[in-house]
Image (cartoon, rainbow, N blue to C red):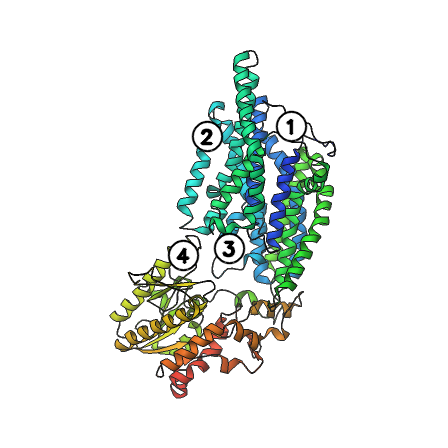
Amino acid sequence: MTSPAPLPPHRPPGPHAAGEPPLRDDIQALRAVAVLWVLLYHAQVPGASGGYLGVDIFFVISGYLITGLIQRALRRGDFSFRAFYGRRARRLLPAAYVVLGATLLLVPWALNRREQIDFVGQLLGALGFANNLVLWKQTGYFEGASDLKPLLHFWSLALEEQYYLVLPALLVFSPARLRTATAIAVTLGSLALLVWWQPIDAGGAFYLLPTRAWELGLGSIGALMTSVSASMATATATARSLADTADARALRCQRVLRTLTLPSWALLLVVPAAPQFFGTAHPGPAALVVGLATLVLLLREPQRWPRVAAPLIRIGDWSYALYLVHWPLIAILHNAWVGLKADPQALMAWRIGAVLLSFPLAWLLHRGVERPAKAALTGPRGAWILGSGTAALALGGIVLALHKPAPGAIDFVELRKPNYGLSANCDAEEPFDGREDCRSRPGARWMVWGDSYAMHLVPGLVRVASDQGLVQATKSSCGPFPGLTPVRPGLGRGNSFASPWIEQCQAFNASVLRWLARHPEIETVVLSSLLTQYLDASKYELQRTRGDASDDGRVRGERAMREALLADMAETVKRLKAMGKRVMVVAPPPSAPFDIAGCLERRQARRWTIGATPGCVIDVKDYEQRRASEHAFIEALAKAEARLPVLRFEPLLCDGTSCQVERDGVPLYRDQGHLSREGSRLLMPAVMSEAVGERQLALRN
C-alpha cells in the first residue's frame, strides 16, 4: 500500500496511546465540517436546513476510529475490555460531566418546572448512556418541544456508547477472517430494519441503535477493510508476487478514492444545504449519501493539509467540546424566549450570539478538562473521581426533581399536563368503539367529536352535560371531517399527516359515524377542531376519503380547501341531523405564538424572559393575522348553516387589543392554544349558554 504522507508541519506533536497513529488532519477537518453544520442548523441559519446531517458524519467517523483502534489492539494481541472502556470513560466523561454539572446549576433559574422534570430524566439518561431512550419516550403530540431540552444532543453520544458496548465483543468473538463480513451483515441488517420500522415509528427509527447502527457500521467496514489490506501486504512480504499483487490492488483503490475525493467533499458541503432533494425522511437517502461520502474520505490515505486549513483543523480538535457546549446555551435561550415570534431576526441574533459564545467556552473545556483528563484520570483514582462525579450529578438531579412549589403558588406542572379529556386512552389509535373510560357515565346522551381541540373541551362539557353524561370520540390532529383528511406532502411515513396515519384518521372518523348510527340515545353532538391542518395551504393538502377516479383525490389551495371543508361539514351535520342528533360546533379559542402557561410560570417565578407581551396576553392583531383562514372558515360556516350553533370564545376573552389568558388568577391555557382543565371548566358553561340556554344550564349545575 502507498505509505501515509507525513503529518503537516503546522500540527504540533501531541500525546497518543502507545502503538496508535497520531491524529489525521483530514479526519479533524471532517469533524470540523460536521460540527459546523450542526451549529449552523441549531442557529437556524438560512441555507443550513440539513445541518443535522453533521451528526451522521460523526457517526461514520466514530465507527471508523473506534473499530480501527480495537482491530489494531487485536492484531497486536493486547486488547483488553477494561482498558478499552477505561479509555472511553477518560475521553468522554470529564468534559461531559462539566457540561452536565454547569447545566444542572443553571436549570432552576432558566427552565420551568415541567422542563426541569424532563431535564432530570435526560440527565439520568445521559449518565446511564440511555438518553436516546429517554428522548424517544419524551416525544409526542403533547410532550415538551425538543428545542427546550438542554440535553437533547446527548442522544447521539448515548447511541455511540451503546454501539461501543456491542462492538468490542462482536470483534473479539468473531474469527479474524469473518470480521469484515460480520460488520457488513450487521450494517445491512440495520439499514433493512430502518426501512421497515420507519413507517411504523419514525421517532424510534430516529433515536434507537438498531436503526442507526448502519451509520457507525459504515465506518467499521472501512476500518476493517483498511486493516485487511494492511495485513495482507505485511503477511505476504516474503512472497514477492503476492505482495506485489496486494500493493497493486491497494494502489488501484487509492487512485479510485483520489478521483472520488472532490465529489465527496462537494456532497458533504452541498447535501446539508439542500436535503429536500433527497426526501424528508431522516435518517434516509441524504444520510446514506453523506455517510458514503465520509467513508470515501476516511479510506483515502492521510494527506498533507496546507497551513491555511489550520483553523478548520483546530475546530476539529475542539469538535467534541463544541458539540457539548453549544446546545445547552441555545436551549436555555429557547426557554427564555416565550413572547411573540413575529420578529424571527431578533431571535436568530440571540442564537448566533449563543453559538459564538460556545467557541471560547469549548476552547476552555478542551484545554482545561478534555485533554488533561485523559492522562490524569487513570487507575483507581480516576475511577473513583468519575464514579463520584456520576453519583453527585445523579443526586443533584433527584434533589431538583423532588422540589415542590412554594405554598400558595400555582402548580404549573399539574396545570400544564396534557388535557386528554376523560382519559389518555381517549386519544384514539384504533377505530372508535365507545370504550368505557371515554364515557363519563353509562347511557350518556352527549358526545364530543374531534381532535385535541375537542379533548380540551371535555372537563367543561362534563359540567355542562351534567347527569346526561358525555361520550368522548377524539384523535389528535384528526378533525371531525369524515370526507377529508389533512396531508403534509413529502413527510416521511410513520408521522402524523402521512401514511399510515392518514388511513387511521379516515377509519376513525368512519367508525364514529357508524357508532352514532347504532346509538340513538346520543342526543347532542359537539364538533370541534383546531382547523389549521385543514386550511393552511402552505403546509397541507386535503385527501378525499373517496377520491375522484379522474384525479388523485387531493384538494390544494386555500380557497379550494376551505370550500371542500365547508361542504364536508355541511354533509356531516346533515347526516347527524338525519340520525336525530342536535349538532353544535365550538370554534378553537384564541391562541398565541408562544406557550401561554410557560410565560405565566416564568412571570410568577421571575425567571429570565425575552419578548413576552405584558401579562402574557394574546395580541388581537397578531392573532387575527395568524388565524385569518380559520376565522374565514368559521364566519362562512355560521352564514351557510344559519340553524347550526357556532360557538366562539372571543366574546368572553377579547377586547379590541388583547385576549385575556387568566380569570380570577387562574391560568386558562396549558400551552399556546389548548385550555387547561380548570380553564375549560371556567369557560365552557358560559360559551355553551347561548346554545343550551341559561335556564337549562342553571338546572344542570
Extreme residue in the bottom direction:
695
- Judging from the image, what secondary structure is the residue with disc 4 in? loop
Residue 387 at x, y percent in the picture: 64, 41
Residue visible at 30% across and 63% down in the picture: 548
Determine which residue is flagged by label 3.
138
| Residue 193 in sight here | yes
Determine which residue is flagged by label 1.
20
Type of the residue with mark 2: Thr
Q: Do the residues labelled 4 and 2 touch (CB within 8 Å)?
A: no
Determine which residue is flagged by label 2.
182
How many marks the image carries: the answer is: 4
For the residue carrying disc 2, how many other residues have a C-alpha within 10 Å: few (<14), some (14-19), or many (20+)? some
Which of marks 3 and 4 precedes in the sequence? 3
Cα separation between marks 1 and 2? 24 Å
For the residue carrying disc 1, how many other residues have a C-alpha within 10 Å: few (<14), some (14-19), or many (20+)? few
Quarter of the image containing the N terminus? top right
Residue 388 at x, y percent in the picture: 66, 43
Q: Nearer the viewer, residue 120 or 185?
A: 185
Query: Is residue 265 shown above or below 350?
Result: above
Cα separation between marks 1 and 4? 49 Å
Quarter of the image containing the C terminus? bottom left
Q: Which of 316 and 557 is in front in this view?
A: 557
Query: Which is closer to the viewer, label 1 or label 4?
Result: 4
